[in-house]
Image: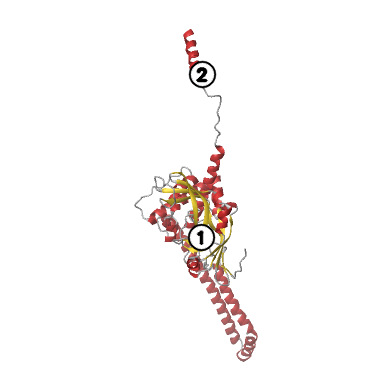
Amino acid sequence: MRFYTIQKLGPKRSLTPEGFLLCQEVPVARTGEMLYGAGEVPVEPAHDGLIRISRTPEEVFRVETLASCEGKPVTLDHPQDFVGPANFGQLSRGTMFNVRRGTGIEDDLIIADLLVTEAEAIKAVQDDGIEEVSLGYEADYEQVSPGRGVQRNIVVNHVALVERGRCGPRCAIGDKEPEMKKKPSFLDKLRALMKDAEAEMETEKKTDDEESEEVEEKKEQTGDSALIKTLMKRMEAQDALLASLATLVKATAKDADGDDEEEEEKAETGDDILEAEQAGKLNQAEVDLYTGDSAKTILSRAEILSPGIKLPTMDAKASTADRAASLCKCQRKALDLAYQTDAGKAAIAPFIGGMTADFEAMPVAMVNTAFMGASELMKALNNGRAHASAAPTKDFGKRSTVADINQRNREYWADRSAK
């Protein structure tokens, strides 16, 4: 399906002539394990109070499940009641369409396009950063054991725009292009200065003929003095230009020296931006990444990425921000250790988009995305190996009866008596 748009807001976002927001290739659901609290689903919780529900590819990509997504409304957060004819006008903020299964690294995702048509919802996405999505649906649940179950017969009712979705940051609207003001470099400043100088010289050139006539007249009238004054004036202008260039070079060199000194100072004291962030200076949006259900699995995922990693002990009395900083630091360490192995590098590389694997310098959101995605890939790979290496159980020989055992005992003791 193709839409007519007039303005490109980013790789995955654009505006229609009416001002509707078109969000393309949005992951709206995934396979795998989901965490629920006691009472959220009809499955008995485990001793830790959590319920782990598995969504298999066979259920998520069922023909009926994908068809139930098509044309369903977009809502701003999950409504208390499912969307129906009676409340559609009140709750609907747009439409979900072009639903399909992802390909390649995204083959565990349901992908859809969203057309957001209501002003408040458009503002929430564009200005307030409400970008994650969560499906609202009905399903049957089959308990496998206390705390574990399987989801079946999924039928979707709506897709909600939420701050934190159960599926995590993989299920979110693609980022818009950042509006960044580039700091002018030395070459930019030099070009601007030279451009002004060229404009001034062009203006002088246009009046050269007039000035030449004036100089000749002055020369005839007063000799060489007028000519000398004119030449001195032009030399002063050239000196001013050279002085401006010299000032610019000195200022640029001073900025560079200042930056170097600042970097050296940070290296000596260890007080750089990243260290401050790891010490707890995460903004609220970054702290929120480590307060949802997915944050509870970070320590176990770190062990999957880097077996044997020494994990931090979390203080139950620590503040939310301090705990978030510790979890982020754990993710960075696990990614760094895993990337040094071939298997870890293969799992992490798709999530860092060709960037240098400097996990200490990566933004928090990218670290979290790479960590979650790579650990999921490693878990799937480990599970596949476990199944592939499982040895079949075989029965060798026939079963011994009581009579057989007694007969062997008699033969044994008879043989000993003979000796």
Left of 216 or right of it: where is 148?
left
Nearer to the camera, 239 or 333: 333
Q: Residue furthest bottom?
A: 221
Relative image position of residue 83 (x, y in whole percent): 49, 62
Quarter of the figure that contains the N terminus: bottom right
At label 2, which amino acid type do we have?
Asp
What residue lies at 60% left-to-right and 76% top-to-bottom? 198
Q: Examine the image and state in which quarter residue 267 appears.
A: bottom left
Which residue is the site of mark 1?
A: 159
Which residue is the site of mark 2?
A: 404
Relative image position of residue 178 (x, y in whole percent): 52, 65
Relative image position of residue 138 (x, y in whole percent): 49, 55
Q: Earlier in the sequence, mark 2 or mark 1?
A: 1
* Cα–Cα span, label 2 and label 1: 68 Å
Q: Nearer the viewer, mark 2 or mark 1?
A: 2
Q: Is residue 232 above or below residue 269?
A: below
Nearer to the camera, 171 or 94: 94
What number is the disc on residue 212?
none
Q: Examine the image and state in which quarter residue 200 appears.
A: bottom right
Relative image position of residue 327 (x, y in whole percent): 43, 52
